[in-house]
Image (cartoon, helix red, strand yellow):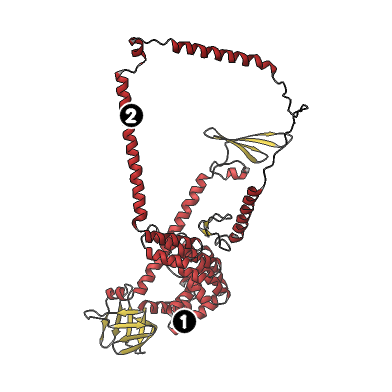
Amino acid sequence: MALITCPECGRKKVSDTAEACPSCGFGIKAYFEKKYEEEENKETEIKYTEPINKEPEHEEPKNENGIEEIRKKDSGKKPYILYALLALLVVCVLLYVFLKQKPHDEDSQLAIAPTESDEAMLETENIEASEQSDENNSEISSETESEVSSEEEDPVKESKYIEANELLSTGGYDEAREIFAQLDSYKDSKKLLKECDYQKAEILYANGDDQAAKDIYLTIERYEDSHDKILECTYNIAYSYYQAGDYLNAAILLYEPGTGQLLHKESDDLRKLMAKDNRSWFIKKAKEEFNKGNFDNAGICYQAVGGRYKLSDQEKADYDLNLFMIQIQGEYTAENRPGIQGIISGYNFTQGDVTYKITPMFKKNNGSVRLVGLLDGQEGHYLQSSEEGSVTERSDKNGGTHWSTEAWRIKNTDRVARRESEQAANDEKAKEEKAKKEAEERAKAKNVPAIGMTADEVRNSSWGEPKKINKTTYEWGTSEQWVYSLDRYVYLENGRVTAIQE
């Protein structure tokens, strides 16, 4: 197996043994099996086909002895050839005479012998060339020794590395992963370890096993396009819940904070569809989950119908009671007391060996109304929650015990994490919208006239309306010259751009 690029959509690192491309569904395996078969047949045909000796287009006539008669072509060129041969012969004779009569006196020898400066220069060049050659050989030798040393540094690991790569290329992802995990930091084993997980997740995703694929993608969220695949898998799972009528579990996935799912286009379309077609179902389900003490699920139901501002007055009151119960869940420490002094879980508030039943309600106090949690139905004994996150136990008769804000932040990590995730999701959405707006502005700036555009497309481009239009009508149609500032022109024939001049 090899990792290839999908011929249909260009997706990289797809196994050539995969049944279909994870992105576009193109039949990868069938395509490459056919391709390999055609290449093999072509090689066989070339190898075993006997060469064909083509007959000459015009066969020369033969005499009686079977010898071809030589046509007399270009007979006018023969004198020139003869003259050239004679000239060559003369040159050879002169050269021979010159060599025989070469002077043997000292002056002549000095005239043709190299000078001392020439010899010194030649010697210097030879020495430099020799040194350069030695230096190059030394570098090559050093590099070779380094490569050999690197390869021979740990032959066992190198052997395992090669074996793991072969397994990866043939689809043995689990076995390859185990070896790469053992190799740890050897070469790029850590990256290839993620590649094993990624390829396995890709196969699961292509086969429709979205949950199993998502579980793997979550472990390598920042590798390749794993984050986008997590969103796709989550949407697919949520849509299957929706089709089965399990709207709550679909909504839980679609409104999961901090995952980026809120920005996923298909997920957003499904949220709108559920809010439109199943409003009454979600309101009823919110009350059921609230009564069971599943306040987070009730909150998801209210969120699914559009949030608080989409609710009636009574529904808003129920929403606020549910939100109060979400806010007070967790463990608390009392001021100036060591250890956990109180635990709120569902409708229960536990202090040591004593457990109180919490009843959320609206309490009127000096003309104002606030949310409290009545303890065991006793009118004067209740819990209050501040916006800062602290919870106060109050008693109208005996005073009360106050749990610090700091303790809330330490112990109630779920609520803090949820707030941070929701804020991160909002920030991400704002960032996405800003980037989209900037991209649109850049695209508009780059939208210049191009060959083949219509007249309306040119008008909607960054050049806009022309200053002047020179129009000529012919038998075959119309020709127009649109004149712009800065010596720019657009030429159209029958309403289509055929030339641009700047």
Please determine whether, in this image, residue 259 is positioned above or below residue 6: below
Q: Earlier in the sequence, mark 2 or mark 1?
A: 2
Q: Is residue 429 left or right of residue 473?
A: left
Q: Taking the image as drawn, is residue 310 in sight? A: no
At mark 2, the secondary structure is helix
- Residue farthest toward the left in the current orientation of the protein: 336
* Crowding near the residue tagged with mark 1, few <14, some 14–19, many ≥20 C-alpha atoms within 10 Å: some
Name the residue: 35% across, 16% down.
113
Residue 439 in the image: state x and y as whole percent.
Answer: 48, 51
Is residue 109 or residue 191 the one in the foreground? 109
Numbered label attached to residue 289: 1
| Figure quadrant of residue 491 | top right
Expressed as whole percent of the image width and height from the top left, the position of residue 53 reads 69, 39
Q: Please name the amino acid that badge 2 sits on.
A: Asn
- Mark drawn on residue 84: none
At 54% from the left and 11% from the top, the residue drawn is: 90
As drawn, is 104 to the left or to the right of 7?
A: left
The one nearer the camera, 454 or 192, is 192
Residue 263, horizontal then vertical, whole percent? 48, 63
Q: Quadrant of the C terminus?
A: top right
Residue beneath label 2, please?
Answer: 126
Secondary structure under the numbered disc 1 in the rendered image = helix
Kind of residue indicated by mark 1: Glu
Q: CA distance from mark 2 to mark 1?
A: 94 Å
Question: Vertically, is 322 above or below 36?
Answer: below
Image mark count: 2
Of discs 2 and 1, which sits in the foreground?
Answer: 2
Judge by depth and name the residue closer to the eye, 151 or 374.
Answer: 151
